[in-house]
Image (cartoon, rainbow, N blue to C red):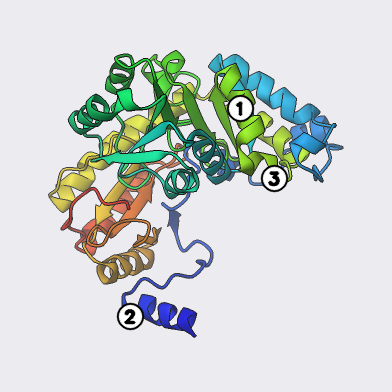
Amino acid sequence: MIYEDILSSLNEEKRLRDIPDGLGGLDLISNDYMSLGAKYSKFSRIFFDRYGETPMTASASRLLQRNQKEHKDLEKMLSGLYGKSILLMNSGYHANTGALSALSIQGTLIVSDKLIHASMIDGIRLGHGDTARFAHNDMDMLRKILQKKASLYKSVVVAVESVYSMDGDLSPLEELVAIKKEYPNVLLYVDEAHAFGVFGDKGLGLAEELGILPEIDILIVTLGKAAAGYGAFIATSKALCSYFINCARSFIFSTALPPSMVAWNKYMIEKLVGMGDERKYLLEMSEWFRKKVKDITGMECQSRSQIIPIHAGSASRAIEMAAKLRDAGVDALPIRRPTVAAGTERIRLSLSAGMTREELEIVLAAISSIGCTNSASPQGRL
């Protein structure tokens, strides 16, 4: 069968993947950036006392379900935090595929960074508008595209991430806002999946950190990472929120999030917004760790966040490095195609606020002992 042939090819290329077993040491895999998931791995008694009788299933899409108290309560709370209309979605993947496909209609141009997440790429592909891409964080290239094409379209959507999940580097959001203001028909679309909870006074993301929340037209935020929950939401204008309710197929045709899960999301976010000290600690510790990794590997790290890659240069080398790290008591998985481009395979280290300096010293010693040296370009997500 052709499918078996594909699997055989993947195996030969050292790209055949399987669902990993349990942890083998210090967890540098999880996106539990604020350690809320580790702390509340079991439902707390306070949550049960407050929400113990909340239904475990919605049993229908939100457009067919009348009992949505938990959903509306969370949307109201988030609207107060962001100053925008909020629409809950079932996951970050649902949010991006639904929103971008709905935006990508005839008369619209979607201009995206080349390293955006697969869910954003798929959303664009599902649409019917025109597309263009610019090299990662290359604002000069973006300007040239807009100068040439923006006037030809009723609407232009510029799609980026705020923190890129494989390199940990930041999008130049302030410059993007300045560029957007030059064109009355440009909307700025920002996925804050890896910034939510980590950046900003209340943990609302990099846009909050930079004081430009009102300038971002569409924000996508996931709840399964720093918020230790499940699902996602879109923060946008009242008109666009209504548009997505009516035109985002992943919203229209999906059974809604379970009310109990929505209540848990709200419970976690209530804790998350007050974790300013933990955010400061995580970012300071991440900066210290990045400098130490540079001393070991000899290569500048472009990361400016809690995500730190160690480049391997090949799939086989990434697998070898991950195995040696696990033997040294560090659990960090190899990242290969199609998640990143060929030649930029890596180990992705994900730091969290619950980690101690002593634990990270163990990680650094493990990196040093196995000869982890960066040998590939630091940018490479497909």
Neighbours of disc 1 within 10 Å: few (<14), some (14-19), many (20+): some
Residue 156: x and y in percent read 38, 28
Q: Is residue 368 above or below residue 184?
A: below
Which is in the foreground here, disc 2 or disc 3?
Answer: 3
Q: Nearer the viewer, residue 338 or 374?
A: 338
Occupied quadrant, residue 237: top right
Q: Residues within 10 Å of mark 3 (few under 14, many from 20)?
A: few
In percent of width and height, residue 117 lies at: 41, 46
What residue did someone put label 1 on?
A: 243
- The residue under the point 21% across, 34% down is 138
Circle nearer the viewer, 1 or 2: 1
| Residue 12: assigned label | 2
Q: Which amino acid does the dot numbered 2 rest on?
A: Glu
Task: Name the residue furthest bottom.
Answer: 1
- Residue that protrudes farthest toward the right in the picture: 53
Tell me the SS state at disc 1.
helix
Tell me where residue 13 appears, x and y as whole percent. Answer: 31, 75
Amino acid found under the numbered disc labelled 1: Tyr
Image point (21%, 49%), residue name: 378
Please give left or right for residue 258 compared with residue 191 in the image: right
Q: Quadrant of residue 208?
A: top left
Q: Secondary structure at mark 2?
A: helix
